[in-house]
Image (cartoon, rainbow, N blue to C red):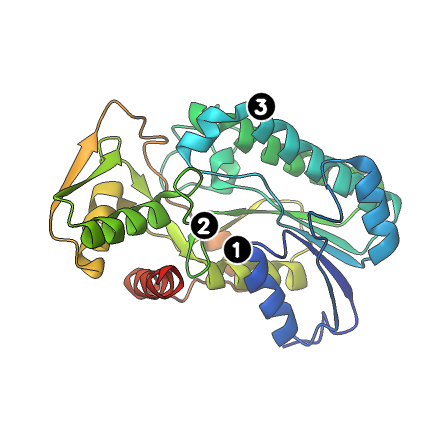
Amino acid sequence: MSGFFENKRVVVTGGAGFLGGYIVKGLEKRGCKNILVPKIEDYDLVNMADIVRMYDDMKPDIVIHLAAVVGGIGANREHPGEFFYKNLMMGVQLIEQGRIRNIEKFTAIGTVCAYPKFTPVPFKEEDIWNGYPEETNAPYGLAKKMLLVQSQAYRSEYGFNSIFLLPVNLYGPGDNFESKSSHVIPALIKKCIDAIESGADHIDCWGTGEVSREFIYVADAAEGILLATEHYDGDEPVNIGAGFEITIKELAEKIAEITGFKSEIRWDSSKPDGQPRRCLDVSRAKKYFGFEAKTRFEDGLKETIKWYRHSAG
């Protein structure tokens, strides 16, 4: 622990959310005495007047911008306009007001959805502009990618210290298990446990199950973001991942095994799969700020399932 955060005023947008809770805990562990979380009830960060008021009230030295409007494939298909507008407006205006106030640092959190649909695996940061993102989440991915453009442009023109990180899909205790907006791991956990409780003879899953994904345990992702905020001051985007991939079919089977669901898993190939493969090259994060994910995937899944059973029960 370097003491970097001890006397800083750190605003964590989205600090009351899933990843935000782990970032706040990580800051506390690092001795940060002024952790400021703008609640949505008090500040609508899509609205410029509320962003100005938040900066005036909280007077941050550092902003870690996690707040986002997110969801799985279904939510992205249903709300492409909302996801584009709200994510773009939040990020662009927060960076602009941070620049005007000459804050010390801005950490912008992007998304793996910013990568082109057919990026060669493992995804290297230099490939981020080599094509259009997967269609179902392109509006969200492109809105987030504009924060990379803005960060680099502001560093070039104003010397503004804004960094851009690309976390892969998160999972872990405290994840969103709402049926309409959850991502794949909580959705599969809920399906399996609901089926066990109801005695159902099968569960239905979207797509073919043949596509692959990479997942990072949320506590590991939080550590990577805090290490970058503390030690990285460059203009290049940096992946935050675990450096492995698993097919959705294998994932469903693993979750079924851990939860004890022994019935049939059915695949609905009329539903979209999303991006064909996802796996990040994580060497840049290790090189630039010494980050490596620590949690074994199976251990993380067990912790997540245990947490969900406890909270749902």
Query: How far apart are the two marked residues, 2 and 1, measured between alpha carbons?
Result: 8 Å
Instruction: Please state the horizontal and vertical placement of residue 44, each as a whole percent of the image.
Output: 73, 41
Q: Mark 3 points at which residue?
A: 81
25 with respect to 57 (left or right)? left
Q: Which of marks 1 and 3 is nearer the N terminus?
A: 1
Q: Which residue is drawn at 62% across and 49% down?
A: 66
Q: Residue at x 88, y 48 (%)?
A: 101
Instruction: Please state the horizontal and vertical placement of residue 207, each as a whole percent of the image.
Output: 26, 30
Residue 147 appears in the picture as rendered: yes
Secondary structure, mark 2, is: loop
Q: Which three-letter amino acid code belongs to the residue tagged 2?
A: Asn
Q: Which three-letter amino acid code belongs to the residue tagged 1?
A: Phe
Secondary structure, mark 3, is: helix
Q: Which residue is drawn at 17% across and 57% down?
A: 257
Which of the numbered marks, if any, corresponds to residue 149? Answer: none
Q: Earlier in the sequence, mark 2 or mark 3?
A: 3
Q: Residue at x 45, y 54 (%)?
A: 175
Q: Mark 2 points at which residue?
A: 176
Secondary structure, mark 1, is: helix
Task: Give the quarter of the figure containing the N terminus.
Answer: bottom right
Q: Find out whether the residues at labels 2 and 1 contact each other: C-beta distance under 8 Å.
A: yes
